[in-house]
């Protein structure tokens, strides 16, 4: 993944009066093809991340307008005034191959992310609390 290639999951988990999803995307997880218009420099840019590549994997705020071109909606704020990001994530296969083509990601301590972001209800460790979120997925390139 590099330059205009992107693979991402956009997540809506908060904003409604009951603390659940409101239909507006909140976060992006994945490989950015670009940063949002009002974004600070992405953390991977200090790694020589131009062009953006798999080293830029992570969790970002949604900075898009509508749902068009999500690969350019990765928003980073430094420092984060909300205290939500950075949040730990794991890319289990940053260099897919023919033998290992899978993309597998983890948002570490997802319940802590939900709590920091103000998503409700708080979840029980037993997994007995009903909750909801909305997801938008994107994979592609605009150079092809």
Image (spheres, rainbow, N blue to C red):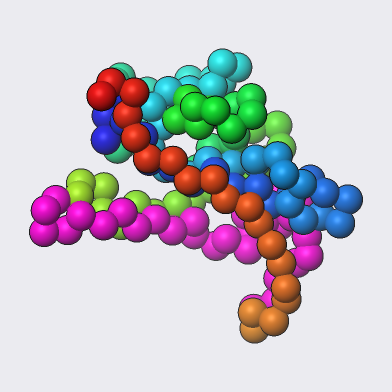
- Measured as percent of width and height from the top left, residue 20 is found at 77, 56
Q: Which residue of the protein is positioned furthest toward the right in this rendering?
A: 17
Point out the residue furthest to the left here: 99
Residue 126: give x, y in percent of width and height: 64, 83
In-front residue for pair 119/130: 130
Count of labels in the image: 0
Residue drawn at (65%, 40%) of the image: 25
Closest to the observer, 124 or 8 = 8
| Quadrant housing residue 38 | top right
Q: Residue pushed farthest top? A: 37
Asked if 37 appears above or below 42 in the picture, the reply is: above
Q: Is residue 63 visible?
A: no
**120 lies left or right of 105:** right
Task: Examine the rendered structure and indicate whether residue 4 appears above or below residue 55.
Answer: above
Assign the N terminus to one quadrant of the image.
top left
Residue segment shown in magenta: 97-125
Q: Quadrant of the C terminus?
A: top left
Q: Is residue 66 magenta?
A: no
Residue found at x 14% / y 51%: 97
The answer to whether 11 is drawn above or below residue 114 in the figure is above
Q: Residue at x 73, y 76 (%)?
A: 129
């Amino acid at each position: 993944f590099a330059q205009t290639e992107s693979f991402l999951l956009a997540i809506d988990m908060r904003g409604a009066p009951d603390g659940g999803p409101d239909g507006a995307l909140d976060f992006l997880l994945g490989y950015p093809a670009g940063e949002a218009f009002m974004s600070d420099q992405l953390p991977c840019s200090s790694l020589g991340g131009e062009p953006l590549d798999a080293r830029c994997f992570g969790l970002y705020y949604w900075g898009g307008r509508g749902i068009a071109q999500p690969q350019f909606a990765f928003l980073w704020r430094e420092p984060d005034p909300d205290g939500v990001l950075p949040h730990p994530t794991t890319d289990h296969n940053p260099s897919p191959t023919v033998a290992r083509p899978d993309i597998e990601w983890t948002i570490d301590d997802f319940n802590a992310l939900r709590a920091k972001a103000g998503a409700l209800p708080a979840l029980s460790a037993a997994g007995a609390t009903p909750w909801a979120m909305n997801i938008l997925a994107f994979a592609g390139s605009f150079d092809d």
